[in-house]
Image (tube, coloured by chain):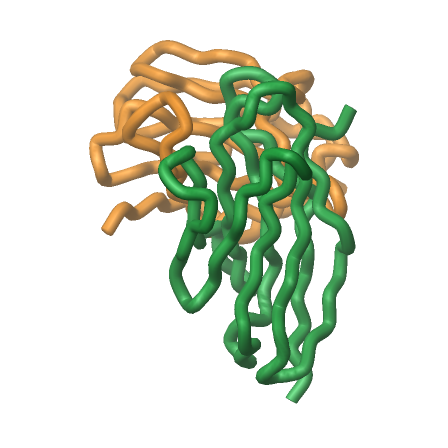
Chain colours: A orange, B green
């Protein structure tokens, strides 16, 4: 079974702090994704990566950056956390780039005070 | 414009009754379509996906979905609800808005005994 793990289930940070969310997958998948989940809005794509050291902006990249130094690890960075970034963050991975099943981690619920 | 629309953010069904969750997409080219389920405090997992092989797609846990091009719909059904079906369900489309997965807003299902 594919396993996607996220470093924290719950995180509380203060406005202006730099926040790191880590995601690791164990199935040698090429593609990794970061989503934000908000009630009524479903999941919205923040950033994705098709290869090591490669990144592409999704629909809502403002205020976020990412890092992929190793194939199995994809990090989401909030440069200066703001209260409107309070949300559930989900990481996913897939083997193929096009229309493939994505495997999701359990999510990190981030609260910014 | 919303690319994937789920009708009804909350659905309540009695145990043993039909579950029907509606999903419509807006795309001139039929996209690849998915249904994911999110159980409480978990990430999303794939229920089923449509990739143009057959219009009626069977998934896990007794769920199935029918692709209707004329109606641009991909509704999810289960003949008899079980208490364990209580979860949030997301419809998603690859290719409806670029080369990425676009999610609907989600439908939370409550199953009454």
Q: Using the image, determine if residue B47 lies above or below residue B55.
A: below
A67 vs A44, left or right, is: left
A72 vs A11, left or right, is: left
Instruction: Please report the residue visible at 50 percent of the width from the left and 50 percent of the height from the top.
Output: B36
A107 vs A12, left or right, is: left
Q: Residue furthest bottom?
A: B113
Q: Using the image, determine if residue A85 lies above or below residue A47.
A: below
**Residue A60 makes an appearance in the image:** yes
Q: Using the image, determine if residue B91 lies above or below residue A80.
A: below
**Front one among A23 and B8:** B8
**Residue A36 makes an appearance in the image:** no
x then y, percent, for residue A110: 63, 44
x then y, percent, for residue A84: 77, 34
Instruction: Please report the residue visible at 39 percent of the width from the left and 27 percent of the height from the top.
Output: A32
Instruction: Please report the residue visible at 53 percent of the width from the left and 79 percent of the height from the top.
Output: B82
**Front one among B2 and A40:** B2
B81 vs B59, left or right, is: right
In the rendered image, the quadrant that contains the C terminus of chain B is: bottom right
**Front one among A94 and B19:** B19
x then y, percent, for residue A92: 42, 37
Number of numbered markers:
0
Instruction: Please report the residue visible at 57 percent of the width from the left and 16 percent of the height from the top.
Output: B98
Q: Residue furthest front?
A: B70
Q: Using the image, determine if residue B13 lies above or below residue A50.
A: below
Rendered image quadrant of residue B40: bottom right
x then y, percent, for residue A23: 40, 36
In the rendered image, the quadrant that contains the N terminus of chain B is: top right
């Amino acid at each position: 079974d594919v396993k996607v793990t996220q470093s924290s289930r719950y995180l509380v940070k203060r406005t202006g702090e730099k926040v790191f969310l880590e995601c690791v997958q164990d199935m040698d998948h090429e593609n990794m994704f970061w989503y934000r989940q908000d009630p009524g809005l479903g999941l919205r794509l923040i950033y994705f990566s098709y290869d090591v050291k490669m990144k592409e902006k999704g629909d809502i990249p403002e205020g976020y950056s990412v890092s992929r130094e190793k194939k199995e690890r994809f990090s989401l960075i909030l440069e200066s956390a703001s209260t409107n970034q309070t949300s559930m963050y989900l990481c996913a991975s897939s083997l193929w780039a096009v229309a493939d099943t994505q495997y999701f981690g359990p999510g990190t619920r981030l609260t910014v005070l | 414009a919303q690319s994937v629309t789920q009708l009804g953010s909350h659905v309540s069904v009695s145990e043993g009754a039909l579950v029907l969750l509606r999903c419509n997409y807006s795309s001139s080219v039929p996209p690849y379509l998915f249904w994911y389920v999110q159980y409480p405090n978990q990430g999303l997992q794939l229920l089923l996906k449509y990739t143009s092989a057959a219009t009626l797609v069977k998934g896990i846990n007794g769920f199935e979905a029918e692709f209707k091009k004329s109606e641009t719909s991909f509704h999810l059904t289960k003949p008899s609800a079980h208490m364990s079906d209580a979860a949030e369900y997301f419809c998603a489309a690859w290719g409806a808005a670029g080369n990425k997965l676009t999610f609907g807003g989600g439908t939370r299902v409550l199953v009454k005994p």
